[in-house]
Amino acid sequence: MTITLPPKVEAAEWIRCERCGEIVYGKRFARELGVCPGCALHTRITARERVEQLFDDGSTVVIEAPATPEDPLGFTDSKPYPDRLREAREKSGLDEAVLCVRGTIDGHGIVAAVMDFRFMGGSLGSAVGARIVAAAEAALVERVPFLLVTASGGARMQEGTLSLMQMATTSQALAELDEAGILTIALITDPTYGGVAASFATLPDVLLAEPGAHVGFAGPRVIEQTIGQELPEGFQTAEFLRARGLIDDVRPRAELRSTLARLCSLQAAGAAGELFQPERSPAGEPSRLLFQPDRLPARSGWTAVQLARHADRPTTLDYARYMLEEFVELHGDRLGGDCPAIVGGLGRLDGRPIVLIGHQKGHTTKERVERNFGMPTPAGYRKAARLMRLAAKLGCPILTLVDTPGAYPGLEAEENGQAWAIAENLRLMSTLPVPVVAVVTGEGGSGGALALGVANRVLALSNAVYSVISPEGCASILWKSPSAAPRAAEALRLDARELLRHRIVDGVIPEPDEGAHTDPALTARLLAAAVAEAFGDLAIHEPRKLIADRRQRFRQFGSGSR
Ligand SMILES: [Zn+2]
């Protein structure tokens, strides 16, 4: 049984890039972490090199696993399986295709299972499965994040159906970490296929991939033979999957250690019991939440609509930058789409981990077009749902920021189930066992806004609006003329003062004098203070009470008691 890292492979003096042909001095190539300085090709590296690149020096200890039968089927092809194992061991210095270690990244504890493609193509046999399960159990006992670095052609044929079963055993191990609230992360490297892709490579909470990594279930040759067509350029690459919402992000090798450190720090902060304490006053601005409608200036609803739509108003990503430390944006609904009109991720507010989710517009015309003017597709609502489930798993409070003219009324949005996606979020939010605070920061447009708005506390910025329909839409239908929009805005009672009067919102955050757009940094501090105060109030409640109170809050609408 290995209890130390495998021996280091000495780099050749000169290395020729297989893609661009550049010839690189071996030591420089190692300094570049095995990435070609000419074309940024991320070459395959060994498990030991990976561990050394990611972990703090000298922090790692190899995790032992129970022994498994070496050749359960007595398998022989052109040579006996035991001979292949022996050769792989000699070549790699590893005893199996995965190296499991515990250690620290930037001081944060973590357990990792790192695959090595040199060892029989990183194939998944019983010993690999047993090691991954043992490593997951170590993460469970130590309550530290579990990282899987994948590189595999798939199942190990030499172990037949026993190999296939490892997909189930490893998936079960990840399910246990889900039940225990332990953060799981995959770093998908080139190539990751078959049984590994269809189990522990794609199940973790956060899926990162290296640039150009190929990932899929069936290999490209099998697909081409089956469909009788050539595959498009970039098919099954990390970038291709990121665009389809199947992975969270593609990160260059040089950024992996810092990204993992940020993610690990979030689990560490949560584990240390650093939850929001009501008596602890947030750093920076004191909260200036207003609860009486009369304290807010009376003005026309239409004026509020114009201010709420101001192009320079801070967006969700602006607030993330101003308010949160260690923010890591996560992407994709894991079903086939990543909607740019809803963003979200993990970060720390006043040192404590939260999940932030919000509509995203943009400031320039280009960005507003790219973000579809903040009008989400079903993929956006499904991404939000995925992040809410992650928050529930990790026990993180959720902050949602609402700023949308409405859900996107488009062809594809309907084909993909816009109504279904919104409805699902309304139900999901009524079951979340963590504190949820929603802030209407700009336009609260109809069902597309409420799909992020079923919270324990609902706040609004003083120039925000919240409405069942846009004033223009209402004017067209009821006044038969869009020019009646100002009258409709008045009638809909959609500004902060009216929202507070009707208790649609529980409190209003006053904006700087001329509006949030004139001082985004101060607006963000005021928002952060109000949100921290609300989380502080909610932190004392048990999950069951949080759910019951949230349901009660919404049940009162229309029952006459509100
Ligand atoms: Zn190159």
Image (cartoon, rainbow, N blue to C red):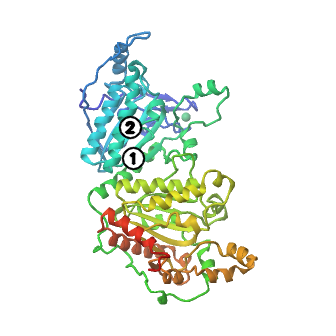
Q: Secondary structure at mark 2?
A: helix
The answer to which quarter of the image holds residue 306 is: bottom right
The quadrant of the rendering that contains the C terminus is: bottom left
In this view, the residue farthest toward the top is 78
Which residue is pictured at 39% across the width and 30% down the height?
A: 116
Q: CA distance from mark 2 to mark 1?
A: 25 Å
Q: Which mark is residue 257?
A: 1
Where is residue 505 drawn, in percent x and y? 47, 76
Q: Secondary structure at mark 1?
A: helix
Where is residue 483 drawn, in percent x and y? 74, 79
In this view, the residue farthest toward the front is 559
| On screen, residue 197 above or below 431 | above
Which residue is pictured at 60% across the width and 56% down the height?
A: 418
Mark 1: amino acid: Arg
Q: Which residue is label 2 attached to? A: 171
In this view, the residue in front, 212 or 12, is 212
Number of residues whose C-alpha sits closer than 10 Å to that of mark 1, classed few (under 14), some (14–19) or many (20 or more): some
Tell me: 216 left or right of 48.
right
